[in-house]
Image (spheres, helix red, strand yellow):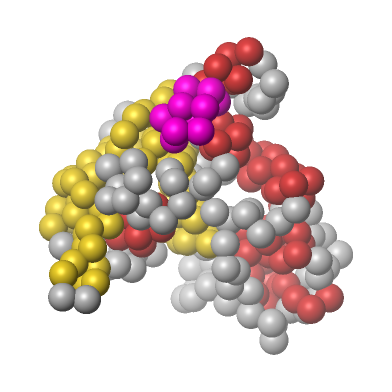
């Protein structure tokens, strides 16, 4: 498969007093079109900084990022970020939140499209509700639907479900996998949760402690839905945890 995302020798440091603090050090990576890649690493290792550079919100000190062979110099409409912090507008209804990013005239009936994606993430009947009327899990569904409604080619996901309780986290993972089985997206996921990475990704990359380097790569060659309790998945989990120094 052709590379959707090509990352070449990225380096990034931040000022720290009279010196600089290296955060990302010579990271190179290729992500195929339609591939789901998860990146795990120790807390503070530079995962989110790497994601921000790839998504175009942070400038690297050196190296390059290309999308479909074209070098990236800033955010692109081809990709959208779903983060742990949330970005739902509290003064808009679910339907209005979903319609917010539908700029221009090429979307047809915007309200109908918004309602279609609301139903896709299990929010049928809540289209006219405001965020304060929804649970935390439902708000995350709104955010996921708002990302998908603009039909991005790439989903950049930075610990998107980390604020949810364990049961809702699992439900959202299942929801995302169901949607990805219906709609094709390339996904780059940052997570601290090894089981989350193994549950969803085609490939798991382990980053080193700061400055971030790709320390190990693991293919996850199992069909969905996956059972994390299977011996093969448990073996992979142990290998990744060993790389992280906690096995």
Residue 74, placed above or below residue 238? below
**Residue closer to the observer: 50 or 181:** 50
Q: Position of residue 223 (x, y in %)?
A: 59, 21
Q: Residue at x 36, y 41 (%)?
A: 207
Q: Is residue 52 left or right of residue 204?
A: left
Residue 222 visible, this angle? no
Q: Is residue 110 left or right of residue 65?
A: right
Chain part drawn in magenta: 237-247
In the current view of this chain or complex, which residue is farthest to the bottom?
Answer: 91
Q: How many discs mark residues in the rendered view?
A: 0
Q: Residue at x 67, y 77 (%)?
A: 96
Residue 90 is covered by the magenta coloring: no
In the current view of this chain or complex, which residue is farthest to the top?
Answer: 231
**Residue closer to the observer: 48 or 1:** 48
**Residue closer to the observer: 159 or 240:** 240
Q: Position of residue 58 (x, y in %)?
A: 29, 67
Q: Quadrant of the N terminus?
A: top left
Residue 242 visible, this angle? yes
Q: Position of residue 232 (x, y in %)?
A: 58, 14
Residue 37, placed above or below residue 12? above
Q: Position of residue 213 (x, y in %)?
A: 27, 42
Picture quadrant where residue 206 is located: top left
Q: Residue at x 63, y 54 (%)?
A: 161
Residue 240 is covered by the magenta coloring: yes
Residue 211, placed above or below residue 112? above
Chief secondary structure of the magenta span?
A: helix
**Residue closer to the observer: 51 or 92:** 51
Residue 241, placed above or below residue 47? above
Q: Residue at x 62, y 54 (%)?
A: 162
Picture quadrant where residue 28 is located: top left
Picture quadrant where residue 200 is located: top right
Q: Is residue 211 left or right of residue 187?
A: left
């Amino acid at each position: 498969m052709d590379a959707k995302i090509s990352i070449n020798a990225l380096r990034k440091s931040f000022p720290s007093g009279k010196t600089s603090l290296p955060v990302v050090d010579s990271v190179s990576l290729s992500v195929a079109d339609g591939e789901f890649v998860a990146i795990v690493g120790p807390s503070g290792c530079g995962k989110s900084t790497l994601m921000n550079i790839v998504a175009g919100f942070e400038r690297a000190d050196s190296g390059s990022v290309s999308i479909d062979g074209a070098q990236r110099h800033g955010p692109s409409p081809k990709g959208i970020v779903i983060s742990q912090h949330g970005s739902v507008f509290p003064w808009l209804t679910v339907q209005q939140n979903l319609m917010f990013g539908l700029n221009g005239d090429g979307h047809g009936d915007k309200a109908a499209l918004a309602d279609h994606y609301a139903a896709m993430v299990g929010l049928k009947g809540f289209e006219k509700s405001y965020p304060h009327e929804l649970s935390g899990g439902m708000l995350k569904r709104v955010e996921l639907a708002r990302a998908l409604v603009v039909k991005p080619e790439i989903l950049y996901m930075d610990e998107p479900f980390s604020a949810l309780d364990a049961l809702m986290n699992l439900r959202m993972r299942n929801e995302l996998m169901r949607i990805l089985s219906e709609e094709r997206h390339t996904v780059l996921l940052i997570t601290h949760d090894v089981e989350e990475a193994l549950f969803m990704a085609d490939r798991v990359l382990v980053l080193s402690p700061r400055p971030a380097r790709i320390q190990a790569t693991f293919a996850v060659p199992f069909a969905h839905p996956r059972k994390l309790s299977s011996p093969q998945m448990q073996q992979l989990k142990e290998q990744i945890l060993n790389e992280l120094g906690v096995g």
